[in-house]
Amino acid sequence: MVMSEFSLDFSQRLNYGRYDQVTVEIVLSSAPETHVAIDAKVDTGSKFCIFQPRYAFLLGFDLESGAREKIRTAAGHFIAYGHEVALSVADIEWDTIVYFAEMETFPVNVVGRIGFLDHLQVGLVDYDQLLYLGPFEAA
Amino acid sequence: MTAKTLPHTRKSSLGKVDLSREREWILQNRHLYVGEWVVLGDGDLVGHSADASEVAAIVEKARARGIDTPYVKFLTEDSEPIWMGWL
């Protein structure tokens, strides 16, 4: 019999079986009361959360007034601008900085470590296509 | 080593995010709108355009209909290369 010394509690279980990748349904909000719903791929290898630039405009941001970052990828690099939003997933919400790519044709929306994973506890059972989430709790 | 700041979360003021109806709509209708932005609300299409600059007007139309949180998505070809992640 194997005994584990570790356990985590999750308040939410999301099924991503209707998507082709590990995907979360989120809402980005900017003041005052401007919301947009997006589906985003979970990418543990991405340092930041990066979205297509159109969403910045829909949230009322002047894209290039945000914090400029040059982001390196396996295939090159691109420019993105950071803006402060409220990010909601399931019934959990927090304020954070997310980035919007400069390139209009940027192909994906991605949630990564800073701004997403660093606010949560996450469990993944890919066989069942289930993602377990809960707010981060200090040990 | 710098001390990390504890993240603060709260219960969402929007309730639980659930785009299952929008996802179902996408699965059923994607082929009709490839290469376009679609704006959905309450599981129904509000508008669509291949011109990204027109999306804001469609979103405003959704909000005027009482859809506070429109779902906005650009629909790509299913046959596009597989996304490998790791930005």
Image (tube, coloured by chain):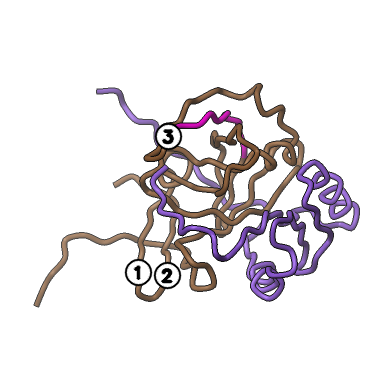
Task: Give the magenta part as a residue range.
Answer: A77-85
- A76 over A18 or under it: above or below: above
Three-letter code for the amino acid on which mark 3 is drawn: Gly
Checking the image for residue A5, the label placed there is: none
| Residue B34 coordinates in the image, percent (x, y) | 69, 62
Residue topped by disc 3: A76
Earlier residue among tags 1 and 3: 3
Question: Which of the two residues, B20 or B29, is positioned nearer the viewer here?
Answer: B29
Q: Taking A38 as reference, is B9 left or right?
A: left
Q: Taking A46 as reference, is A94 left or right?
A: right
Residue topped by disc 2: A130
Earlier residue among tags 3 and 2: 3
| Residue A95 coordinates in the image, percent (x, y) | 57, 38
Q: Taking A31 as reference, is B63 left or right?
A: right
Residue topped by disc 1: A125
Question: Which of the two residues, B77 or A106, is positioned nearer the viewer here?
Answer: B77
Q: Circle 1 marks a residue in which chain?
A: A
- In the rendering, what colour is chain A? brown
Say which element carries label 1. Answer: strand
Three-letter code for the amino acid on which mark 1 is drawn: Val
